């Protein structure tokens, strides 16, 4: 194995994976809190549906709310509206808490990685900056070379 081959992108990614091993749990937790954004986004229209269907439309509450709520909230339209408002606030607070936790976990993991020996090593920093750039440059060159066709002008000229 030559020395030039050892310093390639595979060596870089292997070294990077070994350096971040102590922080994999934090990176995984950051990933998990990011994934939780989708369910909260899908829950946002639920209180509006409850308010429109149950208060204005006169339909019953969804089954899971009928079972979970006391009868006095289920029967009156004011109670249903109160449930919808509480759901809006609860979903918003939980989503903000998720975002805060994601920011804190990501910041902590980033600061720990930044203070590690990997970043302090200047050769590692140079290779961290150089290899993705080289790969991106090669991909961009290959992409543009395969997609472009030469433009030929046949004597047309525009004069205002």
Image (cartoon, rainbow, N blue to C red):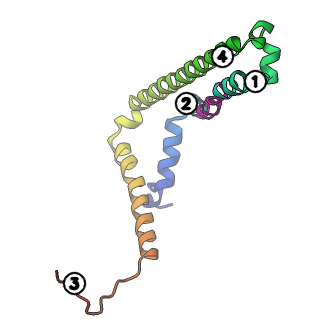
* Secondary-structure class at tag 1: loop
- In the figure, residue 67 lies in which quadrant? top right
Q: Which residue is mark 4?
A: 81
Q: Which residue is mark 1?
A: 58
Q: Identify the residue at image location x=50%, y=48%.
A: 13
Q: Residue 49 lies in magenta, yes or no?
A: no
* Secondary-structure class at tag 2: helix
Q: Which residue is mark 2?
A: 30
Q: Identify the residue at image location x=35%, y=83%.
A: 151
**What is the C-alpha distance between the residues marked 1 and 4?**
12 Å
Q: Which residues are magenta?
A: 35-47
Describe residue 137's horizontal placement relative to residue 1 as left or right: left
**In the image, is residue 63 above or below residue 120?**
above
Name the main secondary structure of what is drawn in magenta: helix
**In the image, is residue 46 above or below residue 118?**
above
**What is the C-alpha distance between the residues marked 2 and 3?**
57 Å
Q: Which residue is mark 3?
A: 158
Label 3 vs label 4, nearer the camera: 4
Which circle's residue, 1 or 4, is located before the other in the chain?
Answer: 1
- In the figure, residue 155 lies in which quadrant? bottom left
């Amino acid at each position: 194995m030559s020395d030039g081959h050892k310093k390639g992108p595979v060596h870089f990614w292997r070294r990077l994976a070994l350096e971040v091993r102590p922080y994999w749990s934090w990176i995984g937790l950051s990933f998990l809190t990011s994934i939780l954004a989708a369910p909260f986004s899908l829950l946002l229209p639920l209180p509006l549906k409850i308010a429109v269907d149950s208060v204005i439309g006169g339909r019953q509450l969804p089954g899971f709310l009928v079972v979970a709520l006391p009868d006095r909230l289920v029967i009156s339209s004011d109670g249903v509206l109160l449930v919808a408002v509480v759901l809006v606030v609860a979903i918003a607070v939980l989503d903000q808490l998720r975002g805060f936790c994601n920011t804190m976990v990501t910041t902590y993991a980033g600061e720990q990685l930044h203070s590690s020996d990997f970043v302090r090593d200047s050769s590692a920093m140079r290779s961290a900056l150089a290899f993705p750039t080289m790969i991106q440059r090669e991909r961009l060159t290959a992409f543009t070379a395969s997609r472009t066709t030469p433009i030929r002008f046949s004597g047309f000229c525009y004069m205002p």
